[in-house]
Image: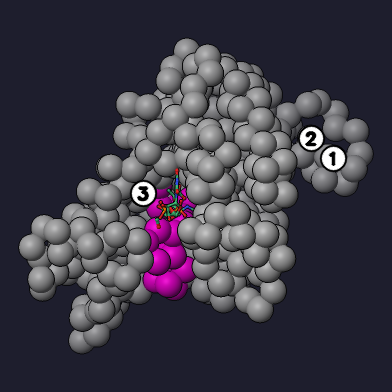
Amino acid sequence: MEKNFSLRKLNTFGFDVTARYFQELKTMDDINELLSNPEFVQCRDAANHVSAKKNPPISCKILILSGGSNILFSDEYFDGFVVYPNLKGIEILDENDENVMIRCYCGEVWKDFVDYTVSRNLYGLENLADIPGKVGAAPVQNIGAYGVEVKDTVYRVHTIDLFNGEVKDYSNEECEFSYRNSIFKKSRGYRVESRELIYAVDFVLKKHGELRLDYGNIRNYLIANNITHPTLQDVAATVKAIRAEKLPEVGIVGSVGSFFQNAIVTKDIYLEIKELYPEVPSYPVDDDSIKIPTGWLIDKAGWRGHREGHVGVWDKQALVLVHYGGGKPKEILDLMKKIQNSVKEKFDVEIKPEVNLV
Ligand code: EPU
């Protein structure tokens, strides 16, 4: 266990946050040892007190940190215990003529896992190529891109409760997946009192699948590159190329991808916006609500490419806030509030962060 550990390399925003305690977990034995680590036990007791709305004996939060690509620390000191699960391994559990069931441990890098499946001609994850982060975090917010969500291929999620050591397997249904959400985010996930650690995820992928080309620019990009009969590998490469055009490169410019969730608005609000901007992009959700891309709202409110101090709004995708280095988390939080107020004032829409605020 490390004390006063810098998380600068473990959050893709690149903020220099220090954690009071930090423990990397590489094996199941490491996890079991953690459960009796005296500092961890103290923090766990404190978290239990907080959950029971009692005063804790000491102040100490617990955080399960994965790839750090969807997290914003509000302060430069994390007064608590950061648990960093990093179990590695990919195993084929079962296969038949149509499907392959694969177990992937939480510490595998998501984009490498996608490349592994694509190179073996397995269908299902190709549209999710190049998403930053690790496999263990993928189910937490049900990562999605280009018309596909991870829930479409997740078969089971394996967890261990850091408070009582209980091991549990969640079926796909039990995960309660929805747009950028799951049971792990709703009730557990990255909340400071989080307790269930995802140590492995089982996926079912197809040997003969259908390519999904209808979202965004995928089809146009293929046509522009004279690819008339795209393969699985062509689709993954196309997604990577489109992402590279729109999103800042991880490790070069600090960001967490989409900072905000897309907005779901009432029909009335949508019609008001459409009257002023007939070109507003939208996707129906149900009879009364419509999804409007928040990137479009922020862009129309004039923020795209805006820079203040060490932070700003990415010039190719206004949904993405960036940290150019040397800044503090507060600068992003201030910018977030300004953008939220501005979008509220201009469109009467409240936009919510997608990033986990800790
Ligand atoms: N738009 C603008 N200006 C902008 C940004 C977007 O006008 O600055 C317009 C675009 O022209 C397009 C629409 O808004 O008409 C939607 O934009 P885009 O297709 O780029 O996707 P998005 O809705 O902004 C979502 C996900 C991304 C994912 C893409 C592609 C969320 C919060 N974000 O973005 O996910 O890669 O679709 O599927 O749902 C992430 O979660 O970190 C992420 C990058």
Q: Which mark is residue 49?
A: 1
The relative height of residue 61 versus residue 142 in the rendered view (above or below) is: above
Report the front residue among 61 and 233.
Answer: 233
Q: Residue furthest right?
A: 54
- Image quadrant holding the C terminus, namely top right
- Looking at the picture, which amino acid does disc 2 mark? Ala
Q: Nearer the viewer, mark 3 or mark 1?
A: 3
Q: Is ligand 1 within 8 Å of the beta carbon of the residue shown at mark 3?
A: yes
Residue 265 lies, in percent from the top left, at 67, 61
Residue 47 lies, in percent from the top left, at 77, 39
Q: Give the Cα distance between marks 2 and 1.
A: 5 Å
Residue 12 lies, in percent from the top left, at 43, 32
- Looking at the picture, which amino acid does disc 1 mark? His
Element at badge 2? helix
Residue occupying image coordinates x 20% and y 58%: 221
Q: Is ligand 1 within 8 Å of the beta carbon of the residue shown at mark 1?
A: no
The tag earlier along the polypeptide, 3 or 1, is: 1
Q: Which mark is residue 131?
A: 3
> Which residues are drawn in magenta?
134-155
The tag earlier along the polypeptide, 3 or 2, is: 2
Per the image, the residue denoted by label 2 is 46
Residue occupying image coordinates x 40% and y 66%: 147
